[in-house]
Amino acid sequence: MTALLEVRGVSKRFGGVQAVKEVSFQVRPGTVKALIGPNGAGKTTLFNLVSGVVAPDAGQVLFKGAPIQGRPPHRVAALGLSRTFQHIRLFAGMTALENVMVGRHPRSRAGFLAGMLHLPGTWREEREIEARAREALDFLGIAELAGAEATSLSYGQQRAVELARALASDPELLLLDEPAAGLNMRETVELAKLVGRIRERGITVLLVEHDMGLVMGISDEVVVLSYGQKIADAEPRAVQQDPEVIRVYLGEEEPA
């Protein structure tokens, strides 16, 4: 099966720190793949490389067979790849609905000039964007929050709004950066069910997560990073039994 996302030998250095070193992996269509590792392993940096937040020093990122490294995030999103962030990034002073509508705009056709001139096509497209945003809120069960100021909502509700914003762009690949962070046990169980529903909609998922119960329960494959390098890439059970992964997580001594 042809990979939807392929990362080939990607590296990134920040000053004297090698954050990611020659990492390669694939994400097959219709799957859930997790990216795990201790703090400082390079997981979020790798997400930023894939989504266009930063450009790699070396290597390639291919989406549907075409290289996307170096493209700005809004161009990457327009291709069908969207993401959430480890730390919630909602726009203050805007409603939940308006925040979600922002996520749909990379898919819009009207340009800035058409919007300034209030052309008929722009108004029609704006109504379509609002409708898709409301659908995303409804899918997540938070339609009643549409008119609420986004940053005044509870932490869990803000997480849901950010996810709705990512889904509003109709992504083929959804990147979730620590989606269970700050959630209680009940909310984490609901998140697992939600990822399943997202997958049923034909959306492929790549996630960074520290909750191993969640990772092992929903993932088809797991990539493990340590100090910016890949040390495992396999099905969850195989990863759990990998001696190097066990050493990294449990801190066991190297054999003499």
Image: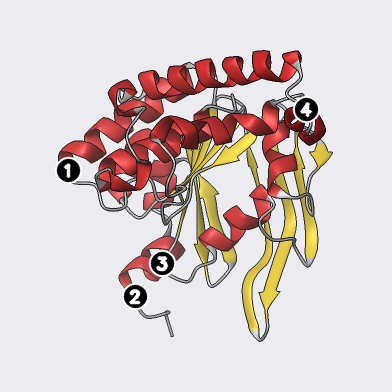
As shown in the figure, which amino acid type bears the numbered disc 2?
Gly
Name which residue lies at 70% across and 43% down: 74
Q: Nearer the viewer, mark 4 or mark 1?
A: 4
Q: Is residue 175 left or right of residue 141?
A: right
- Which tag, 1 or 3, sits closer to the chain's start? 3
As shown in the figure, which amino acid type bears the numbered disc 4?
Leu
161 or 230: nearer the eye? 161
Q: Are marks 4 and 2 in contact (CB under 8 Å)?
A: no
Name which residue lies at 76% across and 24% down: 109
Q: Is residue 232 left or right of residue 216?
A: right
Name which residue lies at 76% across and 19% down: 119
Residue with the mark numbered 1:
185
Q: Secondary structure at mark 1?
A: helix
Location of the C terminus (image quadrant) = bottom left
Q: Secondary structure at mark 2?
A: loop
Cα distance in 3D space between marks 3 and 4 = 51 Å
Q: Nearer the viewer, mark 3 or mark 4?
A: 4
Residue with the mark numbered 2:
251
Q: Are marks 3 and 4 in contact (CB under 8 Å)?
A: no
Cα distance in 3D space between marks 4 and 2 = 62 Å
Residue with the mark numbered 4:
117
As shown in the figure, which amino acid type bears the numbered disc 3?
Pro
Residue with the mark numbered 3:
38
